[in-house]
Image: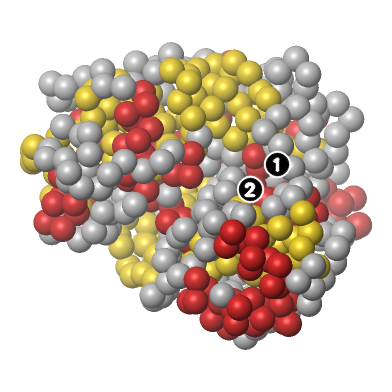
Amino acid sequence: MTILVIAEHTNTQLGAATLNTVAAAQQIGGEIHVLVAGVDLEGAVAAAQGIEGISKVLVANAAAYAHQLPENVAPLVASLVIDQSVIYSHILAPATANGKNILPRVAALLDVDQISEIISVESADTFKRPIYAGNAIATVQSNAAVKVITVRATGFDAVAAVGGSAAVEAVAAAHNAGVSLFVGEQLAKSDRPELTAAKIVVSGGRGMQNGDNFKHLYSLADKLGAGVGASRAAVDAGFVANDMQVGQTGKIVAPQLYIAVGISGAIQHLAGMKDSKVIVAINKDEEAPIFQVADYGLVADLFEAVPELEQQL
Amino acid sequence: MKVMAAVKRVVDYNVKVRVKADGTGVDLANVKMALNPFCEIAVEEAVRLKEQGIATEVVVVTVGPATAQEQLRTALALGADRAILVESAEELSSLAVAKLLKAVVDKEQPQLVILGKQAIDSDNNQTGQMLAALSGFAQGTFASKVEVAGDKVQVTREIDGGLQTVALNLPAIVTTDLRLNEPRYASLPNIMKAKKKPLETVTPDALGVATASTNRLLNVEAPAARSAGIKVKSVAELVEKLKNEAKVI
């Protein structure tokens, strides 16, 4: 078996979720190739070569792939399966915004059903994945000739980013469907760790009352080296940007320590953080459902407790 | 131009679902069903395009059981003009749904198809992308802003770390994220009017679509429960526990 992993990257850097996805591929077993599709890829390719346990890095360097538009990248991936001498048994991508955008398009081109957001590998054709916002776990088997799968990063411990020495092979095919154009992007600039990769996450909910009050969390997070997240209620109320949202409809995180501040603990929020190793809840409502999943609960006014916590660290 | 919104009947988002003891799925008997929240946003966006004079007709379509007519009526009450039910009693895979929607798109020829980014039951997040692939259309997934201008649609997308804007040739597929809009409540007169709007029913056979899946559901189980821990009395105690007991700071 040979498995193709689609790398998460920014052309210059490799995304951390790639390492978790390679870990899932290792559990399936077989030779592992990593595809890096983009433009001016020296940085991402060099990083991909170092990934432990992979044998080959396929590089598709073309202007059409610059922003990884799915209309152009999906036919590339499908062509690697159909046209090349290697017969891929599985195609894996991390369940990031990019992976979720591209991979179903690949699956449809190959006329197979995709299995989304697996959290465990039971065998080469059987996988577990959460459904109903994580309130149920489905075991799904695929009989497709090529199994198309997105991987939830928190379900798999990352492989080492260095130590490997994979061969690099250029992929010639340049697919440009010509139906979509990249116009621009606005990326939040932050020195804090990215939410899904952070060891510690501090999140605020509706109890924060407004966006300005998030400064208490930023300050605490900076002392802890933590990422900052938010509940959907806080995002819906306009306190903070949506890319900070943790939950079924936002990001899925599983850090070593998750500190939920002023978050009641709606089902859809729990779906995004309940696999965290240690959960701390700070809420003045002692009946809040968040306390049912918290390892350590503190019933207190967050505006007193958060500054005090920062001070005592 | 014609705009199509594709919707799904799902368990209401407020319902706490229970896994059936025999492991075949979740118990949906006597459970409140509703329009998938992301699909509601899709219908709202389509209706707004009509109100802005950009869309001339809004067609809402679903693939589901006969009871999914309820959700189509909800969409009609929100402002869609007519509805199509592709009736299938069995739960279909995302690819099968995408193939059925493709057949409807071929017939109806909409310039824009808006879908929810994911259904809150299967959490697949696949159908819109698959429909785009099968149709050969461009896709703007996880949209927080949709602007039609001439023969293009400009879509602002929610991506990891921020926003991305793409320009897509029409016809195109858009899938909605939460912040695209806030759906209206259907007024009583509109609910009454919706009962008289046209609703057509077709079968997968009539559309000539095979719905077999390469996936098989083997089992559904409840997730490992996380038990409640302890309540600490003070910040000092919390810090002490985190340092010495949990050893995470």
Residue B100 visible, this orientation: no
Please name the residue that numbered disc 2 is placed on.
A274
Q: Secondary structure at mark 1?
A: loop
Residue B166: x %, y % from top left: 37, 62
What is the three-letter code of the residue carrying label 1?
Arg
Residue A198 visible, this orientation: yes
Instruction: Please report the residue visible at 11 percent of the width from the left and 56 percent of the height from the top.
Output: A42
| Closer to us: A78 or A253 | A253
Instruction: Please report the residue visible at 47 percent of the width from the left and 58 percent of the height from the top.
Output: A199
- Tell whether A24 sits left or right of A268: left
Q: Chain of mark 2?
A: A
| Closer to us: A289 or A118 | A289
Instruction: Please report the residue visible at 49 percent of the width from the left and 76 percent of the height from the top.
Output: A223
Which of the numbered marks, if any, corresponds to residue B226?
Answer: 1
Answer above or below: position of B54 versus B35.
below
Answer above or below: position of A34 versus B87.
below
Q: Chain of mark 1?
A: B
Instruction: Please report the residue visible at 60 percent of the width from the left and 35 percent of the height from the top.
Output: A130
Q: CA distance from mark 1 to mark 2?
A: 8 Å
Residue B221: x %, y % from top left: 68, 25
